[in-house]
Amino acid sequence: MAMNRIQFRSGLSILESLKGFGTEAQCEQALEVASWSDGFHCPRCNGTAYYVIRDGIRKVFQCRACRHQTSLIAGTVFQGTKLT
Ligand SMILES: [Zn+2]
């Protein structure tokens, strides 16, 4: 499996912190904080305004400017994996 070009910005500390999380919701929170420690940034247009959309149990962020949708695990090594 090829590694995604987008790696954790904070290094292994995130993986370490994830070990303590038992639920997907908690992982989601951790990833949200880890992904955008300085706020949401659209990967397409770098906009910072967004909507939060619930897609089942997933939280999807939609950029207000270009409507690009990003899920919390998109672009991370967790994409395509099941955490629970
Ligand atoms: Zn955008």
Image: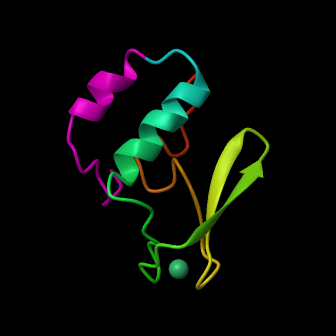
Q: Would residue 48 appear left or right of 15 to someone viewing this image?
A: right
**Compared with residue 13, is residue 21 higher up or lower down, i.e. above or below?**
above
- Regarding residue 33, the answer to whether it shows in the image is yes
Q: Main secondary structure of the magenta part?
A: loop
Residue 24: name its quadrant. top right
The residue at the point 65 percent across, 79 percent down is: 67
| Residue 50 x, y percent position in the rendering | 59, 69
Residue lying furthest right in this view? 56
Residue 75 falls left or right of residue 55: left
State which region is magenta.
1-20
Image position of 45 with respect to 5: above or below: below
Apparent side of residue 81 relative to residue 55 in the rendered image (left or right): left
Q: Position of residue 71 (x, y in %)?
A: 58, 55
Question: Residue 21: percent from the left, percent from the top?
Answer: 46, 18
Q: Is any atom of residue 77 visible in this view?
A: no
Residue at image position (53%, 49%) is: 72
The residue under the point 40% across, 60% down is 39
Q: Quadrant of the C terminus?
A: top right
Colour scheme: rainbow
Q: Judge whether 67 appears above or below 4 on screen.
A: below
The question of residue 15 being in magenta is answered with: yes
Q: Position of residue 82 (x, y in %)?
A: 58, 30
